[in-house]
Image (spheres, rainbow, N blue to C red):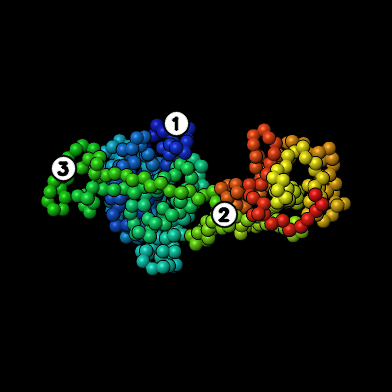
Amino acid sequence: MVSLTMNATESQVPSPDRPESYPRRVLVTVSGLTPQIITETLYALSRRDPPFIPTEVQVITTELGRQKFVAAIEKFRHFFREYDLPVPRCDPGDLYVVAGPSGQATDVRTPADNEHVGNLIMQRVLELTSDPNCAVHASIAGGRKTMGFYLGYLMSMFGRDQDRISHVLVNEVFENETAFYYPPRKLEKIRVSDGRELYADDNSVLLSEIPFIRHRGGFSEEDLRRQGMTFQQAVGLAQRAIVRTELVIDVDQRKVRAGDIDVRMQANPLAFLAWVAAVRVRGTESVRYSDSPEEFLRWYERVLDDAGSVKFEETKRAVRNGFEEEDFRFRVHAVNTAFRRALGASRASEYSIKLLKKRSGRYSLSLPGMAITLRGTVVA
C-alpha cells in the first residue's frame, strides 16, 4: 500500500518535540492474535493534537500473528479510507516474523525463541533509529509479553529525542471483542458478543504515552554501526554506562582506559591528555593556552620515547612561542573526539576536557583527581 496524499507535516522543519514533523514516521508494533491493537493505535494517534500519521507501519509478530493481520488487512485499509488519511506503507516486507534457529517461523515460548525475538526487535529498532529523518513510535500493547518488554527496553537503549513509546487502552466493553477495530467515524451502535449494542467514541480508545530514559548516548558510534550485534551483546554494551567512572592513562604503554573501555588515542592528543591529567591530579585544576608548553612537550617525549623523532621536532617547532589559542582548542577537541568515538556522547562527557567558565580560557578534566590514575612521570 502506497501513500495517496501528502501529510501537511512533511513541509515542516523536523523538531524532536514534534515527532509528527519528520518526513519519515514509522509506527512499530508487536502483534499477536489481536491485530485490532494496530488499528486501535493508529486511530488514537490520528486523534491527537497534532496527529501523528505514520508513513510506514512495521509489524513484529509470530507466524500465527502474521496470518491474523493479513486476514484483517481490509480493516486496516478501511480505517484510512473512512478517516480520509494518507495510507502508510505496510507491505509484506514490513511484517517481521519471529524465526527459530532453522529459519522457520516459530512462536515465542522457549528460551531460544526469546533470544531470537530479542535479536529481531533489536535489529528493527537499531536500523530505524539510525535514520535522522525518521521518528519512531513504538506500540508495546500487543504480542507476547516478552515481545512488548523487548520493544520498550530496546527503545530505551536506542531511542532518540523524537522517538516515543505508547500503550493503547480500550474500553473494557470492547477490549475482548474481535469485531472491534476502531470507533467508526459516524457515531453508530456496535453489537458486542453478549448481544448488547453500544456506541464507540473517542473515549473508547485511549493512548497512554510512556516516558522512558534514553540510553543511546552511552553507545559509541562504532557500537551503533556494529554488524550482526545480538540483543545479549547490546545489553552488555549498555551495562558499561553504569561501570565505575575511572580514567587510567598509561603513558609508557600508550594506552588510555575509561572505565572498562580502551580508548584509541594518537600520541599527540595522548600527551596533551596526560599533561591536563597531571595538572588535575596535582590539584592545580586547570590549564590554558597561555601556559608554557614545556610540560606538554615532556609528556610528548615520554609518549614517543624518542626526543629526536620527526614528530617531536615538528610539534616542538609548532609551540616554540607558546600555544596558539586555536591550536590549543584543536588539541582539546582531538582528545574529546577520541572519547566520544569510544564511549558515545553521553558517557564521554564524564571524561572530556571542558572549558570551566565562558571566556576564562581555562580547561580541565571533568573527573576529580582521585578518579584519575596516571602511570608515568615527567618533571613538571
Q: Residues within 10 Å of mark 2 (few under 14, many from 20)?
A: some
Element carrying mark 3: strand
* Residue 59 position in % (x across, y down): 38, 52
Q: Nearer the viewer, residue 253 or 163?
A: 253
In the displayed structure, would residue 371 be above or below residue 198? below
Q: Quadrant of residue 333?
A: top right
On the image, numbered disc 2 is attached to which residue?
223
* Residue 281 position in % (x across, y down): 70, 51
Q: Residues within 10 Å of mark 3 (few under 14, many from 20)?
A: some
Say the numbered circle drawn on residue 11.
Answer: 1
What amino acid does circle 2 point to? Asp
The Cα–Cα distance between marks 1 and 2, rounded to whole angstroms, is: 33 Å
What amino acid does circle 3 point to? Lys
In this rendering, position of residue 171 left or right of residue 333: left
* Image mark count: 3
In the displayed structure, would residue 127 be above or below residue 64? above
Say the numbered circle drawn on residue 189.
Answer: 3
Quarter of the picture containing the N terminus is top left
Element carrying mark 2: helix
Which residue corresponds to the image point at 49% horizontal and 40% vertical from the top-left?
133
Q: Nearer the viewer, residue 338 or 128?
A: 338
Q: Residue furthest left?
A: 195
The Cα–Cα distance between marks 2 and 3, rounded to whole angstroms, is: 53 Å
Which residue corresponds to the image point at 41% horizontal and 54% vertical from the top-left?
151
The answer to whether residue 269 shows anywhere in this view is: no
What amino acid does circle 1 point to? Ser
First along the sequence among labels 1 and 3: 1
In this rendering, position of residue 369 left or right of residue 160: right
